[in-house]
Image (cartoon, rainbow, N blue to C red):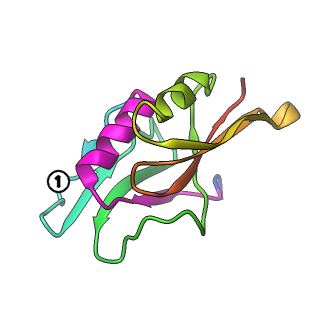
Amino acid sequence: MNNAVNWFEIPAADFDRAKTFYETVLGAKIQISPTSRKERKEGYFPSGDGGVGGGLVQGDGYEPSQTGTLVYLNAGENLDKALASVERAGGTIVLPKTSLGPNGFIAMFIDTEGNKVAFHSMK
């Protein structure tokens, strides 16, 4: 096993709003799934060549939450840029940039859907 995680899904109450939020804070396009339909919308975060992937999903059984599993998104070289976009994009920062010593930095936020999500970067 190369990675403990191989896929994640972030629930969305309003798919288009969530898509706009994550594209803004990550500076990357979310690819709409060809299997998206009226009752279940899906979009994929970029995962690079062989990287761990994930997506946004709106549909039955997907309820945004601030409790439960916490996903840490890769904020690139320095999470300051992504974190600076959170509030402008409609989210709320709940843990500012925090050092983990040699393990880099984290920050946590509530997205436009009500999910608690985190960023990680090494700088």
Count of numbered circles on the image: 1
- Left or right of 98 on screen, residue 4: left
Q: Nearer the viewer, residue 122 or 85?
A: 85
Residue 54 spot, x, y in % from top left: 43, 52
- Left or right of 42 on screen, residue 107: right
The relative height of residue 105 versus residue 67 in the rendered view (above or below) is above
- Please say whether residue 25 is one of the residues in the magenta stretch: yes
> Quarter of the image holding residue 113?
bottom left
Q: Nearer the viewer, residue 61 or 43?
A: 61
Which quarter of the image is occupied by the N terminus?
A: bottom right
- Please say whether residue 64 is one of the residues in the magenta stretch: no
Magenta stretch? 4-27
- Left or right of 64 on screen, residue 4: right
* Residue on which disc 1 sits: 34
Residue 96 spot, x, y in % from top left: 69, 36
Residue 87 spot, x, y in % from top left: 48, 34
What residue do we see at 57% from left, 32% from top?
Answer: 75
